[in-house]
Amino acid sequence: MNCPNCGKEMQEGFLQAGNLLAFNKKRHKLSLNPKDPEDTMIARKAFTATDFSGFICKECGLVIFDYKNPIVHW
Ligand SMILES: [Zn+2]
């Protein structure tokens, strides 16, 4: 897959998150819990991590992953 930003070849791999990962419309200072209807909690696990298949561009820093399909099995 080529980077939609710079066009260079992207490296395939896994985005591995900790317990919480959120994409929020505005930055939250304290809690990552959703405050806006457009806020998206990407990963919320009490004791385990959440991994996603994805692509990274080492050239410009873009990471692409499908947040609706986390990898749940080893
Ligand atoms: Zn790029």
Image (cartoon, grey):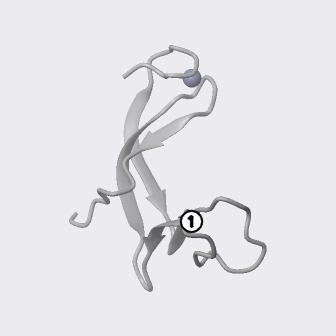
Q: What is the x, y in percent for residue 8?
A: 50, 15
Q: Residue at x 42, y 71 (%)?
A: 49
Nearer to us in this view, 71 or 42: 42
Q: Quadrant of residue 70?
A: bottom left
Q: Dot 1, how many residues are within 10 Å of its Cα: few (below 14), some (14-19), or many (20+)?
A: some
Left or right of 27: which side holds 68?
Answer: left
Q: What is the x, y in percent for residue 17?
A: 49, 62
Numbered marks: total: 1
Give the residue pinned by disc 1. 39
Task: Tell me the kind of residue under disc 1.
Answer: Asp
Q: Residue at x 44, y 85 (%)?
A: 46
Q: What is the x, y in percent for residue 68?
A: 33, 57
> What secondary structure is found at the residue carrying circle 1?
loop
Residue most extreme to the bottom: 46
Q: Quadrant of residue 35?
A: bottom right
Nearer to us in this view, 74 or 17: 17
Q: Residue at x 73, y 70 (%)?
A: 28
Residue most extreme to the top: 7
Q: Quadrant of the N terminus?
A: top left
Left or right of 28: which side holds 42?
Answer: left
Q: Quadrant of the C terminus?
A: bottom left
Query: Is the residue 25 above or below the residue 28 in the image?
Result: above
Which quadrant does ligand 1 occupy?
top right
